[in-house]
Image: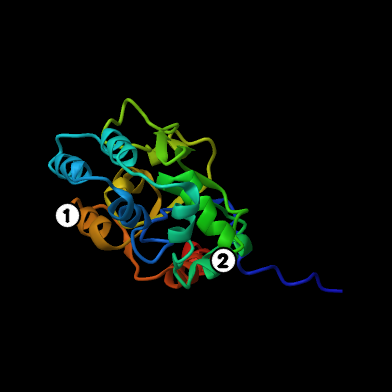
Amino acid sequence: MSPPAPDPVRPAAGLRVFVDFDNTITVGDVLDGLIERFAVGDRWRELEREWAAGRLGARDCLDGQLRSLRGTWPEFEAELAVVQLDAGFAALLEAARRAGAELTILSDNFDRFIQAILRRHGLDGVPVCANHLEFAGDRLEPSFPHYNPACPGCAHCKKTHFVPRRDARRVIYVGDGRSDLCPAREADIVFAKAGLLTQLRAENVPCRPFDGLAGVAAALLRLPHEDHR
């Protein structure tokens, strides 16, 4: 009896897939929307301008912005309940499963917000690494467990989740913005859109443009065929 035909996707095993959250998995920037909705005064705008001009690190910017917000957790939950996910995210999760790839969300957003959104969509088992958030009444208390002093421009230094490399698995990174630059420069394969795509092209860093995660899922399933050409 002939042995069963191998799963054509299995040769892609040995991958780690890291995906940004805001404006990559979600439709729109969740954290920016929350800041605009719950900020008291215009201090958050001043911090944003300082960060955009390069005079303030991302951690100090986010810390100041989150501490300027006022609202109870139920009020934030109500806002998070309407967040939509990219229609291709489910396909990407399935493609990663078929490829034997480990998929992790890496975000400059905050764990409590992300987990609430994923839970609402039945996806609370997806691993998440993000900034941390506690509520004290109507005040927010952010913290930054993944801050890297050697990379002061980032609040969450996403590349530290795979640099230095722990094993020989190839790293795929999917993102859209400024907080994705550090990991994108270190990944083996990058899918980029929006500002990240523009910056990587300016730096001549190889990357693959994408519009939605369905395209990334399809590309992930094609990887074994690319590898064996």
Q: Amino acid at mark 1?
A: Ala
Q: Is residue 166 above or below residue 190?
A: above
Q: Is residue 174 above or below residue 91?
A: above
Q: Quadrant of residue 28?
A: bottom left
Task: Where is residue 49? Give x, y as percent.
Answer: 14, 44
Left or right: residue 39 compared with residue 30: left
Between residue 35 and residue 121, name the one nearer to us.
Answer: 35
Residue in the picture at 56% in, 66% down:
95
| Residue designated by label 1 | 202
Q: Which mark is residue 128?
A: none
Left or right: residue 184 compared with residue 42: right
Q: How many badges with numbers are in the image?
A: 2
Query: Quick one: label 2, few (<14), some, or many (20+) residues within 10 Å?
Result: many
Query: Label 2 vs label 1: CA separation?
Result: 30 Å
Task: Where is residue 194? Give x, y as percent.
Answer: 26, 62
Q: Is residue 22 above or below residue 210?
A: above
| Residue designated by label 2 | 95
Task: Where is residue 189? Give x, y as percent.
Answer: 40, 55
Between residue 38 and residue 47, name the one nearer to us.
Answer: 38
Residue in the picture at 24% in, 54% down:
200
Report if residue 16 is visible in the image: no
Q: Give the SS element for disc 1.
A: helix
Task: Where is residue 181? Give x, y as percent.
Answer: 29, 47
Contact (Cβ within 8 Å) of mark 2 with mark 1? no
Assign the N terminus to one quadrant of the image. bottom right
Q: Amino acid at mark 2?
A: Ala
Q: Residue furthest top?
A: 149
Residue in the picture at 58% in, 53% down:
126
